[in-house]
Amino acid sequence: MTFSFDPTAYGPAVEALIATASLCELGPGSPNRVVAADLRALDEAVVFGSKTVSNRDMAACCISGLWLLHNYLDDSHTISQDIHTTTGSYWHGIMHRREPDFSNAKYWFRRVGDHEIFPILKDAAAEVARNSSIDKGSEFLAKQTKWDAFAFVDLCESATRGKTDETLPRQVAQLEWQILFDYCFKRAIGS
């Protein structure tokens, strides 16, 4: 299963926000102040344009994800903590993983359970891992038969503490963001 991410599929406002983002951080990162006003202006009309939103929780997940993409963890958290779905818990878990509050991230990933994007994420992560230099801490990415969100939290913790290289985990975190955002966007508009 190959995942292809096309930022143009989401409309000009989202495309511009994606284009100005850097590779996902494993830690909190620094807020991208260049897009602060654009992020503050986000609402369903800006994100989805003329598309009809049929799932408000998924629409809110998209907005939370865009804040997170630009390292505004508190703003993302404010939104995701009020989305009482497994996908809201997923965004909440990513935010806590980046905080870094690894045990709290695992709490939220327990609430996620076996998310629908996990098979796609597992395959995408394995492909990136096979094409990268893999250190001992991240070899599971190429070999796992099922996505293990908890092992990925552990890998991110190891990388943020300097025990393993952060390049591969950041690439996988970027894929995770893309796959989850795409999932949310499509379900927000019922496609």
Image (cartoon, rainbow, N blue to C red):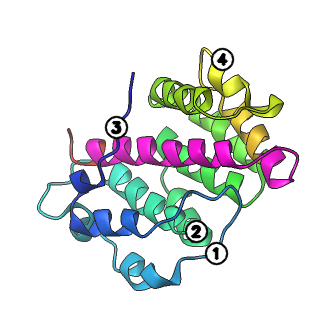
State which quarter of the image contains the N terminus.
top left
Q: Residue at x 42, y 70 (%)?
A: 20
- Magenta span has 76? no
Tell me where the magenta segment starts and ends, as one range: 157-186
Total marks placed: 4
Specify the amino acid type for callout 1: Ser
Which dot marks residue 71? 2
How far is disc 3 from disc 2 in space, using C-alphas?
23 Å
- Magenta span has 168? yes
Q: Is residue 85 visible?
A: no
Kindly indicate whether the residue at mark 4 contacts the one at mark 3 (C-beta within 8 angstroms).
Answer: no
Specify the amino acid type for callout 4: Lys
How far is disc 2 from disc 4 in space, using C-alphas?
30 Å
Specify the amino acid type for callout 2: Asn
Density class for disc 4 (Cα within 10 Å; few <14, some 14-19, many ≥20) is: some
- Of labels 2 and 4, earlier in sequence is 2
How far is disc 1 from disc 4 in space, using C-alphas?
33 Å
Q: Helix, strand, or loop for circle 1?
A: loop
Name the residue tied to disc 4.
143
Name the residue tied to disc 3.
4
State which quarter of the image contains the C terminus.
top left
Q: From the viewer's perspective, is residue 125 above or below residue 161?
A: above
